[in-house]
Image (cartoon, grey):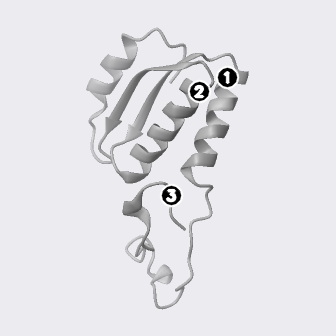
Amino acid sequence: FSATSPQLSELPDISSVDAKFSRGKFPFFARVVPDDNIQGAMMARLLSQLGYHTINMVYTDEAYGQGLCEVLTTNVNAAGSRVDVSVGVPDYGDVFDDALHKLRSSQARGV
């Protein structure tokens, strides 16, 4: 079930999202998304195939976002490309102005 972050090793209680997903009703609910290592490798390969050799990243500044950002950065560097700007933002509110300013000053063709 876990992604690459040890903080994500326990099954989360998602009943706050939808009561029908309470731990009692669905004790074996699991993540159905590939782990960060697989996602990061595939994203880096896709970016390279599309010709993006300098990229920017905006990620949520929490365990899921940080883990995938680290893995993607490692894979992008291994492919001979680079991450120019990487900006973590809280997963709440309107806090994107600073991130947009940093990204606009980059030489990357996409985010």
Residue corresponding to mark 1: 48
Name which of mark 3 and mark 2 comes first in the sequence. Answer: 3
At x 38%, y 18%, the residue is 103
Q: Residues within 10 Å of mark 2 (few under 14, many from 20)?
A: few
Q: Where is 18 relative to 82, above or below?
A: below
**Relative image position of residue 15 (x, y in whole percent):** 41, 77
Name which of mark 1 and mark 3 comes first in the sequence. Answer: 3
Query: Tag 1, which secondary structure?
Result: helix
Name which of mark 2 and mark 1 comes first in the sequence. Answer: 1
Disc number for residue 3: 3
**Relative image position of residue 85 (x, y in whole percent):** 40, 21
**Type of amino acid at the residue the image marks with label 1:** Ser
- Residue sticking out furthest to the bottom: 24
Query: Tag 2, which secondary structure?
Result: helix
At x 38%, y 13%, the residue is 104
**Type of amino acid at the residue the image marks with label 2:** Ala
Q: Give the spatial CA distance, label 3 vs label 2.
A: 21 Å
At x 35%, y 30%, the residue is 87
Disc number for residue 78: 2
At x 42%, y 72%, the residue is 10
The front one of 23 and 68 is: 68
